[in-house]
């Protein structure tokens, strides 16, 4: 798939090109290989289990790339009988908060609200949820402290 340029279904290819959803054959395949290599992921795996379909497997080492997904699971003895990573079941805003905390070292309600495009009260509630789950720690002198922040300690 990576080196051979052909349309498995020329009619679909023609429609996608007509609507300008693709620019050239094999463009998406090439971009997928490049972006996965940039992230340190293994190459996509293609197979044809029969003559009617192509199977694509994308391997993801997310536990290595995003520290907060594996740290708590490995070190917190209170987590019993969990095979899923602790971050499963989190909302999008909670995941965004953890990402900011990981990348920037801390997250504030204001920063999360800006980044996630939500009201500051919504951001504060999400951060409080993460504290209750033990994924973040709160630092401040009171609920209205303008210098309050959350981190992973």
Image (cartoon, rainbow, N blue to C red):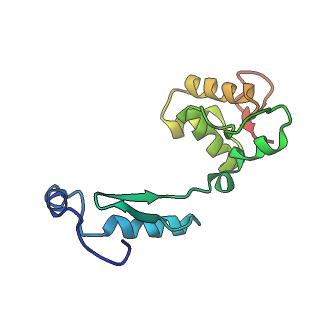
Residue 61 appears at what percent x and percent y? 62, 56
Q: Quadrant of the N terminus?
A: bottom left
Residue 62 appears at what percent x and percent y? 62, 52
Quarter residue 132 falls in: top right
User: In this rendering, is residue 18 above or below 110?
Assistant: below
- Is 137 displayed left or right of 89 in the figure? right
Number of dots carrying numbers: 0
Q: Nearer the viewer, residue 131 or 17?
A: 17
Residue 111 visible (yes or no): no
Q: Nearer the viewer, residue 66 or 83?
A: 83
Residue 102 visible (yes or no): yes
- Is 55 displayed left or right of 148 in the figure? left
Quarter residue 47 falls in: bottom left
Question: Image point 55% across, 34% down: which residue?
Answer: 93
Give the residue at the far front of this rendering.
50
Quarter residue 40 falls in: bottom right
User: In this rendering, is residue 140 above or below 111?
Assistant: above
Residue 123 appears at what percent x and percent y? 59, 29
Q: Quadrant of the C terminus?
A: top right
Q: Nearer the viewer, residue 137 or 71?
A: 71
């Amino acid at each position: 798939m990576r080196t051979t340029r052909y349309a498995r279904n020329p009619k679909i290819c023609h429609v996608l090109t007509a609507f300008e959803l693709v620019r050239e054959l094999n463009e998406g395949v090439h971009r997928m290989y490049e972006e996965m290599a940039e992230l340190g992921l293994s190459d996509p795996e293609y197979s044809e289990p029969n003559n009617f379909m192509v199977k694509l497997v994308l391997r993801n080492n997310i536990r290595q790339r995003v520290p907060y997904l594996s740290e708590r699971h490995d070190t917190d003895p209170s987590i019993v009988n969990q095979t899923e990573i602790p971050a499963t079941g989190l909302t999008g805003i909670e995941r965004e908060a953890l990402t900011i905390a990981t990348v920037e070292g801390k997250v504030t309600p204001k920063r999360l609200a800006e980044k996630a495009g939500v009201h500051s009260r919504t951001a504060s509630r999400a951060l409080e949820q993460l504290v209750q789950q033990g994924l973040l720690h709160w630092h401040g002198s009171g609920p209205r402290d303008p210098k309050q922040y959350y981190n992973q300690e």
